Amino acid sequence: VASVDRRRGRMSEMLEDERFDGLLLSFAQQCQGIDGLLDNVFSFLRRKTDFYDVGDKARDKVVRMFEKHEALAERTGSEKKKRRAEEEQRAAARREAARKKSVEEVEKEAQSAAPEPPAPKAAAADNPKKDDDGDDDDKEPPPPGNGGTTSWGIWTQQLQELQIQVPVPAAVKSRDLVVDMKKTHITVGVKNQPPIVDGDLHKKIIVDDCFWTLEEDAAGRKEVVISMQKENKMEWWKCVIVGDPEINTQKVQPENSKLGDLDGETRMTVEKMMFDQRQKALGKPTADEMGKQDILEKFMKQHPEMDFSKAKFNDAPSLPDSAFPLCTSSPALLPVARREGLYDDSTVSVEGEAVASTPPP
C-alpha cells in the first residue's frame, strides 16, 4: 500500500510539473533558446514584481531552485544510464543465447547423422558410379539458420527475408558506417576505408523495407546487422552475394507457420490438404471424393424414375453443376447432356438390363 501511495505521489508531482509545459515550450520557441527564456523571466521579475527588493534573498532563492533541479537532473540521468545498461546486457544475453542455441542444434544434427554402411562389393561392381556420386547430400546437415558463413560475416534467412551480420572494429560508431542497399547491390563498410561487403545480390530485394543497426555484445564486439526483405517471398536464396559459397536449398528448414498468418487462398489449400491427410489415415474418403459422392446422391434424388439398385459404381462420376437443371427439367434430354459433355456416366457400370423403372416421358 505504501509503495502504491508513493507511486501515486510521484505521478501527481509529475503532472503538477508538466501542467505549464505547453505554455513554456511556446514561450521558449519565441525566445529562441534558453538564454532568451531566462533573460525574459528575470526581466519580468524586475519589472512586474518586488523580487529584487529583498536583496541577497533573491539570489539565494535562485541558487536554491537551481541546485534542486540540478540534483533531480543528475538522478534522472543516472537512472536512464542504469536502465540503458541493463537493457544492453539483456539484449547481449539474448543474442548470445540464440547464437549458442544455433551452434548446439547444428552440432546435434551433425552427430545424429549416422554414416551410411559401405556398399557390398558386388553392388559396387554392378554400379561403379554409385560410389562416386554417393549420398553425400543426404548426410549433409541443414545449413545453420538456413544460411551460411562467408569471408565478410554470417547470413541467415527465412522464406520472406534474410539477415546478414558483418563484424566491424569495436571503435566504430554508427556515423562512421557506410551502408548502401540497392535492388540488386549492397555495400557495407567504414568511411574512408575499403568496403567490407561490396557486390551484386543473388536475388532482388525490396529496398524500402530493409534496415540496419549497429549492435554490440557483452564482450564489446560490434557488428552491423542488416535485415532485407526479398522481392520474391517464395524462394530460398543459395547465397547473398554473387560468387559467395552456395548452400543446398534442399536442406533448408522452413519456420513453423500458423494458419492465421496465411492468406485466405493459401489457408484454404492447407486446411484441405490437412483434412484429406486425416481422412486417408482413417480410411475415409477425401474432400474431392466426398464431393463426387454428394453429386451422385443429388443426381439419384433428382431422378427417382431411374433404378440404381443393380448398378455397380467403380467411382463417383464427375458431374458439373450445370447438368442438374438440364436433367431435372426433362430426363429425356440426358442424351443431349451426354453429347454436350455436361454429364459423363462412363464410370458407372450396370449389371443387368434397363435401369429405368418407368420409361421417360
Image: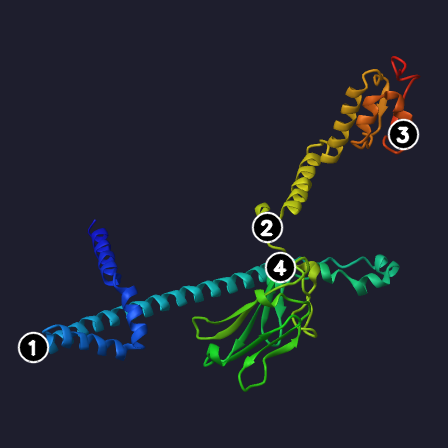
- Residue at image coords 73%, 62%: 136
Q: Judge from the rendering whether residue 192 lies leftward or rightward of residue 75; answer left or right.
A: right
Q: In which quarter of the image is the C terminus?
A: top right
Q: Mark 3 points at which residue?
A: 338
Residue 196, above or below 346: below
Residue denoted by label 1: 53
Question: Which circle's residue, 1 or 2, is located before the other in the chain?
Answer: 1
Q: Residue 160 carries which label?
A: 4
What is the distance, in whole Å, between disc 2 and disc 4 at their CAs? Answer: 12 Å
Marks 1/3: CA–CA distance: 113 Å
Q: Earlier in the sequence, mark 2 or mark 4?
A: 4
Q: Helix, strand, or loop for circle 1? A: helix
> Mark 2 sits on what residue?
257
Q: Earlier in the sequence, mark 3 or mark 4?
A: 4
Tell me which numbered mark, 1 or 3, is placed earlier along the sequence: 1
**Relative side of 284 to 22, left or right:** right
Of 30 and 354, which appears nearest the observer?
Answer: 30
Marked residue nearer the N-terminal end (4 or 1): 1
Q: In which quarter of the image is residue 115?
A: bottom right
Residue visible at 90% across and 14% down?
359
| Along the line of sight, the residue nearer the viewer: 58 or 233 | 58
CB atoms at circles 1 and 2 under 8 Å apart? no
Q: Which residue is rendered at x = 81% and y = 65% of the image? A: 132
**Distance of label 1 from label 2 (alpha carbons):** 76 Å
Number of residues whose C-alpha sits closer than 10 Å to that of mark 2, classed few (under 14), some (14–19) or many (20 or more): few
* Label 3: which secondary element: helix
- The residue under label 2 is which amino acid type? Ser
Q: Nearer the viewer, mark 1 or mark 2?
A: 1
Give the image location of residue 124, x and y in percent: 84, 60
Q: Which amino acid does label 1 sit on?
A: Asp
Looking at the rendered structure, the kind of residue marked 3 is: Arg
358 up-or-down from 217: above or below: above
